[in-house]
Image (cartoon, rainbow, N blue to C red):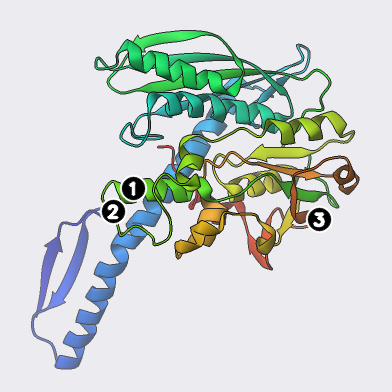
Amino acid sequence: MLKQVQHDREAAGGDVLLYLYTSSPPYLLFTQSLLFTIYYLLTPIYYLLFTIYYKVMKEKEFIETIKSVTGSKYIGDDCAYIEDLGIVLTQDNLVEDVHFKLDFTTPYKLGCKSAAVNISDICASGAKPAYLTIALSLPDNIDTDFIKEFYEGAACGNVEIAGGDITGGDKIFISVSAVGSAAGRRISSRSHARAGYKVIVSGEHGSSAAGLRLLNVLEGGPEFPAGIPAGCALINAHLTPKAQCEFSEQIARQINEDYAMMDSSDGLMDALSAIAQASGVMLCIDFDKIPYNKDIEQFADYKDLILYGGEDYQLIAAVPEKLLKKIKNYTIIGEVKDGTPGVEINGKFYTRQDIETRLYDHF
């Protein structure tokens, strides 16, 4: 006799009907039990992966819709290069409880980071950071002391704050626009990587993601990793990142060819795959060459932090090999080759789709 039992369950497909045999031989009952166990284990995993994929594709779809509606030729890189005016423009938002928690930071550090993330985009273009405007939406509990400290922090990047706006809101919302000067510099594009170019990076990778993990631990998460003191360089890397202005300037002033450059705001792999996709090339990377703070080896998944952890705000560039004799303070981590667009790391190939579901979700 077959009895139909309906189980209301939140899953990717909605309500799911499960069929149970009320009178079956023992071997069938065992088989059914095994299948149902597998079902209950895999369904939440499938739902999680489906949700992550949907959210990543949602952001991508929004951007493509905006490009289609506006017809703008400037949308694609992190900065818009307005060539006839000799400037580059960028804008970034930081939202409380999405990009930062007040329990983890101070107004000064928040101001410093808000400026740095936009200055970093200007640096990724190769331009000189020149001006910032800052718009704030603030809840009722914010006072003038917060404003004072925030703007002192925002000024730490030594870029002039030229204006902005302040309104009320339920949470802190920060929107910063930055203007850069292209005078005397060659502006980059993620679509300008060429076969034979070397892939170079500034600084260390994975530190910010490790710092965020430590902050979550201090808030009451898992046991604090041995050997890593609170207030360490990893936490500072997350709370007060530094834009790589010098690295950017030496490339943009001395290069004569087209080149690609991005920052690692959304992770090293995001930058590598975005450059590969936009340029139609393969980036072949030696993982062992990627610089990182050895303290993050305390985490079992430290390699994922290096590749996918965001907010390091280091620069990744694909440049002609002959340029390397003219610049300093860089690390070669790979080279650009003709081939299927994507990233190859120590022989394993990753498409853009492989990478997107592991990147930070802004929604």
CA distance for labels 3 and 1: 42 Å
Q: Provide the residue designation for mark 1.
A: 216
**Callout 1 crowding tier (Cα within 10 Å): few <14, some 14–19, many ≥20:** some
Residue at (34% x, 61% y) in the render: 45
Q: Provide the residue designation for mark 3.
A: 338
On the image, which quarter does residue 168 sit in?
top left
Residue 23 appears in the picture as rendered: yes
Q: Secondary structure at mark 1?
A: helix
On the image, which quarter does residue 274 sit in?
top right
**Callout 3 crowding tier (Cα within 10 Å): few <14, some 14–19, many ≥20:** few
The amino acid marked with disc number 1 is: Asn
**Could you say which disc has been placed on residue 221 in the image?**
2
Query: In which quadrant of the rendered image does the N terminus lie?
Result: bottom left
Query: Quick one: 206 or 232, which is closer to the camera?
Result: 232
38 sits to left or right of 318: left
328 sits to left or right of 295: right
113 sits to left or right of 75: left
**Could you say which disc has been placed on residue 235 in the image?**
none
Comparing marks 3 and 1, which lies closer to the viewer? 1
Query: In which quadrant of the rendered image does the C terminus lie?
Result: top left
Label pair 2/1, CB-CB below 8 angstroms: yes
The amino acid marked with disc number 2 is: Gly
Q: Measuring from the top left, give residue 295's x and y in whole percent.
A: 51, 57
Q: Is residue 277 above or below residue 175?
A: below
First in sequence, mark 2 or 1: give its number. 1
